[in-house]
Image: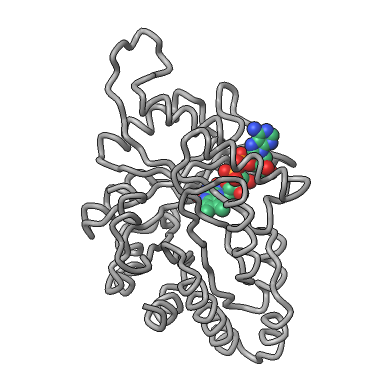
Amino acid sequence: MKVTEHIAQAKKTLISFEVLPPLKGKTISSLYDHLNPLMEFKPSWINVTYHRSETMFKKKTDGTFEKVEVRKRPGTVGICAAIMNHYKIDAVPHLICGGFTKRETEDALIDLNFLGIDNVLVLRGDAAKNEASFEPEMNGNSYAIDLLKQVGDLNNGIYLDKDIQNGSKTNFCMGIAGYPEKHFEAPNLEIDLKYLKQKVDAGAEFIMTQMFFDNQKFFDFVNACRALDITIPIIPGLKPITSKKQLSVLPRIFHVDIPTELSNEVMKCKTDVEVETVGTNWLINQSKELKSFGVPVLHYYTLGKPKIIHNVVKSVV
Ligand code: FAD
């Protein structure tokens, strides 16, 4: 079922989760172990992130280095199929421009369609680890909007190969990313929102946000979107703080602010267990306030911390 249909039919605030594919070498059971405790909350869907390959230099026995492309977390499409089969709930794969030609993307979309997957979260992806800034693949998509248009074309039966006449139409519901604190490459929020609006006009049907720790930033973002006539559902992405290190790691990697009140509380903690308590309580309060604000869904990044997410959701539903 489409994300938009879940939201339209909802009688209360929905819950959804996001997981990373297991590291290469791990089994699918490790993912089920992670998700099993969260299933009591009957999530409407589970997002599965996509991770591009990384260029690594491996030392050979003769002392020279070999350049290899390594995908540490493969399997997004297969994991979506496994989740749908195992739990009988929808899976939402993330789809990125980086590392894919348009033809590879088309083939992946055909696979997803054959598997009965109704939704895709359409993203650009970040720069490869060995690149200073994002470089599209040759014959690939440069921005999320280009990928969105490709999915939109396939929804209209338009394939890259123009010889395909009357091609079967896919029916993907397309989500996009939104940044309450703006995307780090955008010169300002206004310009970032201009591009967000273009993605909505190109057919995006829901927005999932980057994590944030200050609800006011989300409320301001929603109001700014509505002022631009962006009327599609905006789903807050939520994550708990679980270690002191994250006070510097999260701003550096995700370009989000940690409110002073939260960082002060975390700094006072003597152990990670204490930090987890502070992070859990903060996220419970955030979730309750967002629920009162009327968000359609509370979307949790589980990122290896299912117990904490379990405690949060239990206090919120
Ligand atoms: P875009 O919409 O393409 O925007 C990128 C930048 O370019 C922005 O600064 C924007 O303002 C600007 N821009 C947009 N359109 C144009 C245009 N037409 N011309 C000029 N500038 C433009 N990454 C992964 O690799 N895998 C994942 O699974 C993943 N999941 C994510 C889930 C969520 C909810 C979020 C918020 C992010 C996720 N990311 C993921 C990270 C995401 O790929 C990065 O943040 C990436 O840098 C931007 O992606 P985007 O789709 O927002 O890009």
State how many labels appear: 0
The quarter holding residue 6 reads: bottom left
Scheme by which the image is coloured? one colour
Left or right: 212 with respect to 168? right
Q: Residue placed farthest to the right in the image? A: 187
Residue sitting at 51 percent across and 26 percent down? Answer: 101
Mark yes or no: residue 61 visible. Answer: no
Return the residue nearer the eye: 39 or 200: 200
Mark yes or no: residue 91 visible. Answer: yes
Q: Position of residue 194 (x, y in %)?
A: 66, 41
Q: Position of residue 73 (x, y in %)?
A: 46, 51
Residue sitting at 56 percent across and 34 percent down? Answer: 145
Residue sitting at 51 percent across and 47 percent down? Answer: 51
Return the residue nearer the eye: 300 or 303: 300
Residue sitting at 54 percent across and 35 percent down? Answer: 97
Q: Position of residue 287 (x, y in %)?
A: 49, 75
On the rendering, which quadrant does ligand 1 occupy?
top right
Q: Residue placed farthest to the top in the image? A: 163
Return the residue nearer the eye: 9 or 77: 9
Q: Is residue 308 above or below residue 76?
A: below
Q: Is residue 210 above or below residue 309?
A: above
Q: Is residue 131 above or below residue 168?
A: below
Quadrant placement of the C terminus: bottom left
Q: Position of residue 66 (x, y in %)?
A: 62, 38
